[in-house]
Amino acid sequence: MAEPNELTTNAFFIEVSGAGLPEVDGLFIPSTAPPAESESGTVSSLGYWNGRMAWDRADGKSARSPSLSYSNSYKSWRICRLDGHLAYDATCEDEMPPTDTEWHVYKKGVAPAPKVVLHHYDPRLPCPDPNVVFVIGGPGSGKGTMCELAESQLGWTHLSTGDLLRAEREAGGPAAATIEEFITAGKLVPNDIVVTLLRNAMETVTRTTGRNNFLLDGFPRSVSNLKAWNEIFSQDSELPKMLYFECPYEVLEKRIMGRAKYTGRSDDNVESVKLRFDTFKAETLPTVELFKSKDRCVEVDTSQDRQAVYDVVASNLAEYTNKDLAARPLTERAEMLLGLRPYPRQKKDA
Ligand code: AP5
């Protein structure tokens, strides 16, 4: 275990919710408990307790500081009530409080155990601005493949507007009915819905993972998409770079028809591909021209093989890519996406 003076600053925030105990639910901030010797004899430093990060209640009302900490004796993470009694614990040796397992309800706790979310930034402050690259191209031009590669291999976060819209529709939120109406009518979904979904997804990823590099696949699909973006992200901030995936129609059609037998997508047929390509020319190409005129567009010839396309994409992202991630051997997922390894066979339904 690291000596106290080697410990990195505790800059994480923790949100506890759903406990049903107002004195447990709430925000926890890095502990300001003075250095002390713990029950197990470990000397703690600011933000740390028993050699692990520790947190106080943000409202400062807890009788115990830190009020969310690790016990070496019991090998468990613990959350206490205002009166200092323990309410929840999680027996494990994880370096950080577990966010994906159910906590145990301790003597003074109330079921159900709360949900614990780790934040990389103070949730009371605005989220740091995202670092965004737009990825645009005709249907089947390889946007999804290359964005997934950049996510798996280079640590970028891939957000596809098509996927976000479909997920929101399935989740049945307040915009679900409108999304369904527009997608069924084959129209572009209203801009405010698309941009709000993008902004919320980026904010959640940044706050909970600390990742700030985003590839927005399928956005902006129209000049009005871009206008809505500017309204939310302010005209003053620099226009993100656009990677424009250029590919002849014959190649797109061949690729989508090759993919159709696996995806089962209702729009993966020759007729729909033609219609999607027409929409792309009418609605999206003017956006590409706009980015070209502002010198913010990089054209990528995606009729080349996957490795050649990936090399161009990776070099255009290099400035903001973590060097260690870029230098490591290809992940299994990346090898599959590059066509160097077969996808695992799907089990057939019995
Ligand atoms: P969306 O889901 O974004 O569909 P799309 O743009 O038509 O793109 P695809 O997913 O079909 O293709 P892709 O470019 O990702 O290619 P892929 O990597 O799979 O949008 C769906 C709908 O949602 C829209 O029609 C609209 O209604 C709505 N919507 C979306 N965004 C919106 C927005 N901003 N505003 C409003 N509405 C919106 O590759 C294709 C195949 O080729 C794969 O099999 C792949 O393995 C292969 N391949 C890829 N690269 C290569 C290569 N270099 N060599 C050989 N094969 C390759």
Image: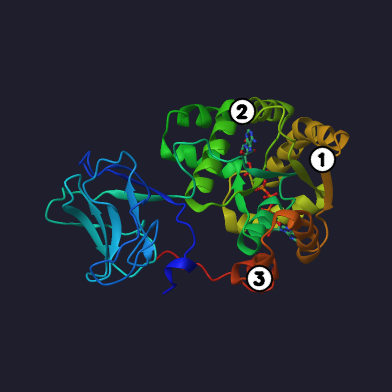
Most foreground residue, 163 or 200: 200
Q: Quadrant of residue 324?
A: bottom right
Q: Residues within 10 Å of mark 2 (few under 14, many from 20)?
A: few
The CA distance from mark 2 to mark 3 is 37 Å
Q: Which residue is mark 2?
A: 232
The amino acid marked with disc number 3 is Glu
Q: Identify which residue is drawn at 54% across, 71% down.
A: 344
Question: Does residue 288 appear anywhere in the picture?
Answer: yes
Q: Quadrant of residue 307?
A: bottom right
Name the N-terminal-most of marks 3 and 1: 1
Q: Which residue is mark 3?
A: 335
Q: Which residue is mark 1?
A: 296
Name the N-terminal-most of marks 1 and 2: 2
Q: Position of residue 87 (x, y in %)?
A: 18, 52
SS at badge 1: loop
Q: Position of residue 226 (x, y in %)?
A: 70, 30
SS at badge 3: helix
Q: Position of residue 298 (x, y in %)?
A: 83, 47
Q: Is mark 2 within 8 Å of ligand 1?
A: no
